[in-house]
Structures are given as C-alpha cells and as structure tokens.
Image: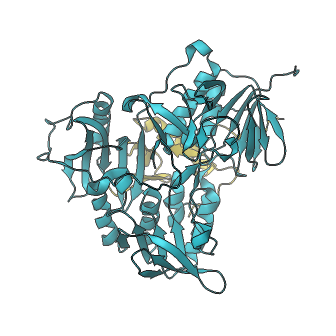
Amino acid sequence: MTSPAEPEALRVVVDLNRCQGYAQCCYAAPEAFSLHGHEILFYDPAPPAERRGAIERAVQACPVRAISLQAGPDDGDAP
Amino acid sequence: MSPEPAGIVVVGASLAGLRGAEALRRGGYDGPLTLVGAEPHRPYDRPPLSKHVLAGALDAGATRLPELTALRARWRLGNTAVALDRAARTVRLADGAVLAYDKLLVATGAEARPWPAATGGGLTGIHTLRGRDDARALRAALVAGPRRVLVVGGGLIGCEATSCLRDLGLPVTLVDPHPTPLANALGTVVGGVIADRLRDAGAVFRPGTQVRAFEGDASGRVVRARLADGSAIEADLVIAALGATRATGWLRGAGLMADPGGLTCDGACRARDADGTPCPDIYAAGDAARWPIPLYGDRLVSVEHWGNAVAQASHAARNMLAGPGDQRPYAHLPAFWSSQFGINIKLVGLTAGADTVAVVQGSLAARRFLAVYGRGGRSIAAVSFDQARWLPAYAEAILTGSPVPPITDATDQPRIARADPGFPPPRRAAPAPSPAETAHA
C-alpha cells in the first residue's frame, strides 16, 4: 500500500496507450515500475522524493517516451 | 472597457483541463488563466481508480497528475460552473462568482450515470465509480467485507471492478444485458474471451438480463436486486457501472448545441451555437466534446478516452491562440487501454459499425491475440489482448483505410477467418438520446 500523496512525493504518469511493455523503466526504477502478467505495467504515481534519480533514469530509458514526471514544486495559486 | 484582459477560463480541472492549460502556456499565452474544477482536488488521474485503487495497491489520493508546465493559474476548485452567458462572456460559478473570459475552454468531462432513485437508487451500499472520492468510498466498503457484490453493467469500468473484486477474494456477480461483457466496445466474439476469464476467476456472470430494481432493509441498506427474468440476487454492495453522461448541464440556456451526449464542436474544436455556427471564443475538449472525426467520415463522436483528453485539449489550446484564418482541424486516431483479469487490452480506432472481425495474430483460445475490425472491407479498428507490440502496425493500416485483414504475410499468423463481430443492435430507448456515437474507456 502506497501512502497518500504527501507534499514531498513525486508525481508520475505513464501514457499507457504509448507504452509497449519494453520494461526499461522496470530495470531503471524497480521500486516504482513493475510488469504484471505478460504486459500490464503497474507503477507508483507518487513515489517518494528520494527516488527522483531512479525515476529520471526511467523517463530517459523509455524507448517510446511514455513516462512523465513533474519537474519541480507545484505552481502556487496565482492571485 | 475593462482595464485588463479577462483572459482565458478553463472550465474543468481534470486531465483535459490541465493539459489544455499547459498547452496554452507552452504556446506562449502569458495572460490571466483560470481553472475551474467541480472537485476540491488538483487534477488527478482516473484510470488507476477502477484498477489499482480498488485492489488496494494504491491510495485514492496517490494519483495526482504531474503538472508539466508552470501554469501561473488561478485555481477555482470545489466550485462548479452553473451558467454561461455568451453575450457578456461570463461564466457563473455555484458560489455566485462571475468570471469574465476572452476565450473559454470547456473541459467539464462526464459524470457517472446514477441508478434511478425510483427503483432503489437512494439505498445505502449502491456506488458509482468516477472520481477519487467515489473510489475511496467504494474501497472502504470493500474492506468492510461485503457478503456479495453485484456489479451492474459489463463495460470497461464494470469489468475492471469485477476483476479487482475477485483479486480481493470477494463473491461477485456481474449482470449485463448482452451475451458477453464489453459487447458494445468490442463485440461478443472478443467479449466472449472476457466472459470466460471472468468465470474462470470465480465471478458469476449473468448475461442477457437486467436489474429492474433494488430492495433495501429497514435501515435503507441495499439487500437484493430484482432482475428482469424474475430472479433475485442477494447483494449488500452494488457497483452501478452504467456509463457516463456528459457534464454539459451548466450550458443549458447558453444557446449552444449541448446535451447529455456532449457539446457539439466543429472540426477545429470550436463549440457550435444553436444555429451550427462555430463560436470563435468557445472551445471544448475531452469527454465533454462531441466532434466530427475525419477518419470516420466526419461522424460526430464523443470519446471518453485518456489519450483524446490529452490530444484534443492540446489541439484546442493551439487553435485558441491562433488567428481565425489558422484554425487547424483535429485529426485523431482514438485509442484506449484496460487491464483486467491479468490481461492488457488495447484498442485503436472506433469499432462502431464494424461488420467483420478477424483474428490476425495469436488466438482467442490462448487469450493472447490481435483482432482487426472491418467495415465495408476496410480496417477501422484493432484490439490486442497481451499483444500490444503488434498494434502500431495495425494503427497505421487503420489510418490508411487498408483492406481487412490489412497484413497477411507476417510471421506466425494464424489462418485468418472473418466473423461477424457480434455488436448489439443500437438501443432504441437510450436514456440520453443523441445523434452522436459514444466510445467508453
């Protein structure tokens, strides 16, 4: 069970239309990405901040560029 | 004259609203930007809700979407748009606030169709599943240990939920009016594979019948469903997976072509007024939009697909920033995915109107295959069950309108037989009559 998203959690989303199950993310960041069955990608959309390096490697390793990671802190509410 | 420009208002703060707003900033828009969201949450991702969240692998609060561009936006969350005044160029919110706009993006999405109150809809224990709060409430009800869960409707949400319930070891019955699950989306030939998997997983499948009414106990809690065939199912938890209606009620009276089937747009994502004229300052994207799709003869469609929300919102944003002479048409190949019963299902194209289905890789018996749908001899859609890597080649064939089957000389192809895909006839008494076709994901 992943804990509820906390302020320091990263934010990740994978375009699963684009994902072809190459599983490179599973090698780059095995705590955050795993394949279930033949080709169902399961991922943690809110990994802890200390995994940023591994998640960034996963983003780079994806041959179809399906992974998005929020780069910085949230935008504040503009006045 | 107002001293500063009113700017752009995006109504809807889910995937389409967020990606539309990001595309506006990426496209160089530097003026005021306001996002209005009915839910109190910043944009979050919905697909995991009916999968990993129900199964308990993710918390409902974990799916907040990455925000990929600095938005510098005013967020009006937990606040519903209730009216549009096109002449005054204002949107009125439920709290009474009135927002002026120079350009408006309608991205209000869709709402789960509730079980009607007259036949038990008000009973405790009847859930719908659309938003994060729905998923959290349903997950809590599952953890409480229901004796039997009844899932009404074998579409994608109903099937994904049923799959999760069996993973949790809960007794579950799925009722659907068609001979197989996913009949509207994939036809009964392909849907039959899911019917088999569902039964193998230990779910009870009751095809060809419908729930007429729910009955409750003295405390108002659901205890039983009465079916059209005269039988009853004892169930203390119900998931009504009846599809969605477009959240366009707030546009009533605005003089647009809007109804529960969507807000009709032209090919450039501009909303059409009641006379059919595209509004230069009102655009729509995502589930709420109904648009002419070039690949299918400009038929009006509204698709509840993740990929369309992203692509259409970006396209609408691009056109919002372009001049009237530079409004580009939105050309899109619809696609969706689902995971259920351990199978990765992916579809490209629209299956509506298919008269043929042919398995072109693998086999239905192995539950690992790729099938192509044809209409009038041309390839219009393709579905893969655990064969996603073949799909891009078939997407290409669909884009070019290749004959069906489009590829006959690939390695490891089975002997290709064509069959009637088994789509149900169109419903005669749909609750939300609409000229548009609808695809669910």
Q: Residue at (36%, 47%) from the top-left corner?
A: B346
Query: Looking at the picture, how far across and down is residue B283, in whole percent?
Result: 62, 30
Among the 4 quarters of the image, the one containing residue B16: top right
Q: Residue at (56%, 51%) from the top-left corner?
A: B245
Q: Which chain is cyan?
A: B
Query: Looking at the picture, how far across and down is residue B391, in whole percent?
Result: 31, 40
The answer to whether B421 appears left or right of B213 in the picture is: left
Location of the N terminus of chain B by quadrant is top right
The answer to whether B172 appears left or right of B244 in the picture is: left
Query: Looking at the picture, how far across and down is residue B109, in whole percent?
Result: 59, 45
User: Farthest bottom residue?
Assistant: B218
User: Farthest top residue?
Assistant: B325
Q: Residue at (76%, 48%) from the top-left corner?
A: B79
Q: Which chain is yellow?
A: A
Q: Residue at (28%, 55%) from the top-left corner?
A: B190
In the picture shown, does residue B222 fall above or below B20? below
**Camera-side residue: B110 or B168?**
B110
**Camera-side residue: B68 or B317?**
B317
